[in-house]
Image: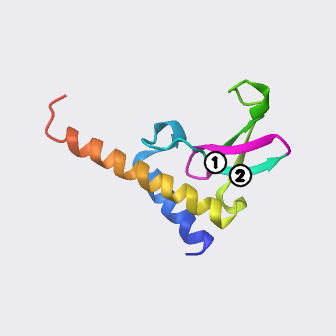
Amino acid sequence: MDKQEVIEKIQAVLVNWGEFSIGEVDGEDCSPCVASHGNIVDLAEYFNNTGVTVEVYQPSSHSSDPIDTYDLDYDELELDILEEILMIAERYDVQQQDLFDSCKGENF
């Protein structure tokens, strides 16, 4: 698949279920690494229809809080990162569909 095909598949999941964060995906304990420089890592942690929100961490600081945040459009990301995001989006899609199916017969 080329970049545009991968982006379209990611966006198809987002059209169905809306934006989501890495923390909402069952079994996903690792965010895609967008960049790293020295002891700083940039992780894609929030996904929306146009791109990702990247949280910047300094793991050696003993704090789990990000030191910076920025947004990137999907077309700014490398294909391998987009493919990783697609795998996460597909896992989220299955998870949300299972939840939806389990609630079908409920009266709310």
Depth check, front residue: 37 or 3: 37
Residue appearing at x 78%, y 31% in the figure: 60
Circle 2 — which element?
strand
Residue 12 in which image quadrant: bottom left
User: Which quarter of the rendered picture does the C terminus lie within?
Assistant: top left
From the viewer's perspective, is the residue at label 1 or at label 2 nearer? 2
Q: Considering the whole magenta stretch, tell me its main secondary structure.
A: strand
* Residue found farthest to the right: 38
Nearer the N terminus, badge 1 or badge 2? Answer: 2
In this view, 56 is above or below 17: above
Crowd around label 1: few <14 · some 14–19 · many ≥20 (10 Å): many
Residue appearing at x 59%, y 70% in the figure: 4
Crowd around label 2: few <14 · some 14–19 · many ≥20 (10 Å): some
Q: Is residue 48 magenta?
A: yes
Instruction: Tell me the residue that label 2 is attached to.
Output: 34
* Residue found farthest to the top: 63
Which residues are the magenta region? 38-52
The answer to whether the residue labelled 1 contacts the one labelled 2, judged by CB atoms less than 8 Å apart, is: yes
Disc number at residue 52?
1
Q: Is residue 83 left or right of residue 24?
A: right
Q: CA–CA distance between discs 1 and 2?
A: 10 Å
Circle 1 — which element?
strand
Residue type highlighted by circle 1: Val
Depth check, front residue: 40 or 91: 40
User: Which quarter of the rendered picture does the N terminus lie within?
Assistant: bottom right
Q: Position of residue 58 (x, y in %)?
A: 78, 34
Residue type highlighted by circle 2: Val
Residue appearing at x 15%, y 34% in the figure: 106
The way the protein has been coloured in the rendering is rainbow
Q: Position of residue 67 (x, y in %)?
A: 78, 30
